[in-house]
Image (spheres, rainbow, N blue to C red):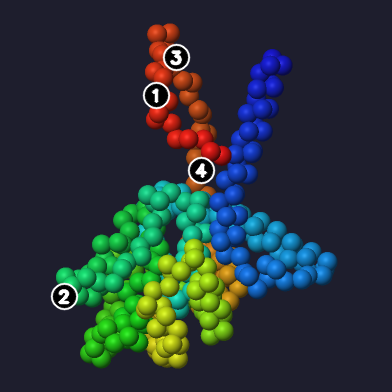
Amino acid sequence: MMKEERAMTSDLIQRIHLEMADSFDEELELELEDEDPRTAEAPLTDEEKAARKEARRVYFRELFRMQGELVKLQEWVVSTGHKLVILFEGRDAAGKGGAIKRITQRLNPRVCRVAALPAPNNREKTQWYFQRYIAHLPAAGEMVLFDRSWYNRAGVERVMGFCSDAEYEEFFRTVPGFEKMLIGSGIQLIKYWFSITDEEQEFRFSCRVHDPLKQWKLSPMDLESRRRWEDYTKAKEIMLDRTSIPEAPWWVVQAVDKKKARLNCIHHLLQQVPYTEVEREPIILPERIHHPDYKRNPVPPEMFVPELY
């Protein structure tokens, strides 16, 4: 290889490494968004600073490692035609969304998608209860993460009085059969409940109240759920007891510490799917075809976005 070619190759590799490092900034931005104000300005000893730095290093190391495994899992899902559904349930501000973001962050949205359904409209209220969820189930080679699911009936609908006693009991009677039907059709179903304490939810709600960038997360329903903490506790306990079946058990994620919750959830998820690394042919970037008569037309200056930064 000529000296000039070696220099070009070295420069290209360096640029690629810098680009890879920049891609991690997305995760750093998410972490800044999730910064805990209880510790952001607290006076720390040198030992505490060192411990926090080490904990942060371990968190990112493990997160990026497991996100690499999630990519392998995704490729296996596509290769084998596996169908995977993961339910994320928990109280408001329990950290479900943060965990979902970290799982999907490096994945192909055409393979792994998130279903976060709004409240049912008037037409949907007249349908079979599970009907609107069925449209979001995966085909072969797909993963679907439900940010809240059909378990709304056992939680918010029960506590807020949006369903009758008869509808509530009918849900418990039919949901095991519904989930067994999904599993019988070849869908793997994994159910997570994110658990936080009374004090932690109050703190996280207070953060949202005082953060203009997060106030949109607080709906009137969220605020009412805070007042009805004990009712939600009773509903959750009944739900876990009556719907944790051998074919689709509930898994409880201790979520007071957000970072640990994400790592524990992702690690557990990876253990639940029997994926293996899929061998791939080496990717070779083809040479671009050049035509002597090709000329790139200039872009009118008024079309450019002003470069303020």
Give the farthest residue toward the top. Answer: 292
Could you classify mark 3 by the number of other residues whose Cα lies within 10 Å: few (under 14), some (14-19), or many (20 or more)? few
Residue 132, quarter of picture:
bottom left
> What mark, if any, has residue 83 been given in the picture?
none
- Which amino acid does the dot numbered 1 rest on? Pro
Q: Position of residue 90 (x, y in %)?
A: 45, 77
Q: CA distance from mark 2 to mark 1?
A: 55 Å
- Residue 249 can be seen in this image: no
Q: Position of residue 89 (x, y in %)?
A: 43, 74
| Comes first in the chain, label 2 or label 4 | 2
The residue carrying mark 4 is 279
Secondary structure at numbered mark 2: loop
The residue carrying mark 1 is 300
> What mark, if any, has residue 290 been given in the picture?
3
Evaluate if marks 2 and 3 touch, with contact meaning CB atoms under 8 Å apart.
no
Q: Viewer-proximal residue, 245 or 52?
A: 52
| Comes first in the chain, label 2 or label 1 | 2
Q: CA distance from mark 1 to mark 3?
A: 24 Å
Evaluate if marks 4 and 3 touch, with contact meaning CB atoms under 8 Å apart.
no
- Which amino acid does the dot numbered 3 rest on? His
Tag in front: 4 or 3 = 3
Could you classify mark 1 by the number of other residues whose Cα lies within 10 Å: few (under 14), some (14-19), or many (20 or more)? few
Q: Position of residue 264 (x, y in %)?
A: 58, 68
The residue carrying mark 2 is 126
